[in-house]
Image (cartoon, grey):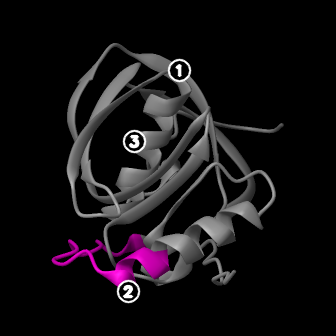
Amino acid sequence: MATRQLRYNDDKILRKRCKEVQIVDDKIRQILDDMMDTLHQTENGAALAANQVGILKRLVVIDYCEYFLKLINPKIVGYSGIQECIEGCLSFPNRFVKTIRPQKVTVQALNENGEEFLITGENEMAKCFCHEIEHLDGEIFLDKAIEEIEL
């Protein structure tokens, strides 16, 4: 088990666009495993994008709402509906905002064997997909805030 150091707040890497993974190999699988270990060692974590641990690759891990996913080069290929959400982020401890997100999102990605697949998430998972994929584009949930809240 290997954990990686989380990046926080004004760390410039959180604003950088991650590069697509060209080859899915053992090195990529090891990074995904490390990211999942890091997620599991972090309190209140649901998902993690690679730049949150200092890696500029399009990788996301999710262990949330009965989903256990390792996504390579994920992109949103469809969405519908609208919902108001409350969001937080491991890279911005103790900050919470309201956002407006799609109610349903379909994501295309590669799995850890390099096989393409589609997955659709609704409600909380739709929010999660949007949040993590935006990280890969150098965007953060605070950019989408309609109101900051205290929990």
Mark in the foreground, 1 or 2: 2
Q: Give me the C-alpha separation between circle 1 and circle 3.
A: 13 Å
The numbered mark at residue 84 is: 1
- List the residue tagged with mark 3: 130
How many numbered marks are there? 3
Label 2 sits on residue: 27
Q: Which residues are magenta?
A: 15-31
Q: Residues within 10 Å of mark 1 (few under 14, many from 20)?
A: some
Hey, what amino acid is under mark 2?
A: Lys
Residue 58: x and y in percent read 31, 67
Q: Residue at x 39, y 16 (%)?
A: 82
Dot 2: element: helix
Is residue 4 highlighted in magenta? no
Q: Amino acid at mark 3?
A: Cys
From the viewer's perspective, is residue 104 above or below residue 140?
above
Other-residue count near label 2 (Cα within 10 Å), few / some / many at <14 / 14–19 / ≥20: few
**Residue 26 % position (x, y):** 36, 83
Report the quarter where the C terminus lies. top right
Q: Judging from the image, what secondary structure is the residue with disc 1 in?
A: strand
Judged left or right of residue 10, residue 79 is left
Left or right of residue 119, residue 29 in this image = right
Q: In this orientation, which residue lies closer to the viewer: 126 or 22? A: 22
| Residue 81 locus on image (x, y percent) | 33, 13
Helix or strand or loop: what does disc 3 sit on? Answer: helix
Q: Is residue 90 left or right of residue 103?
A: right
Vertical placement of residue 57 versus 122, above or below: below
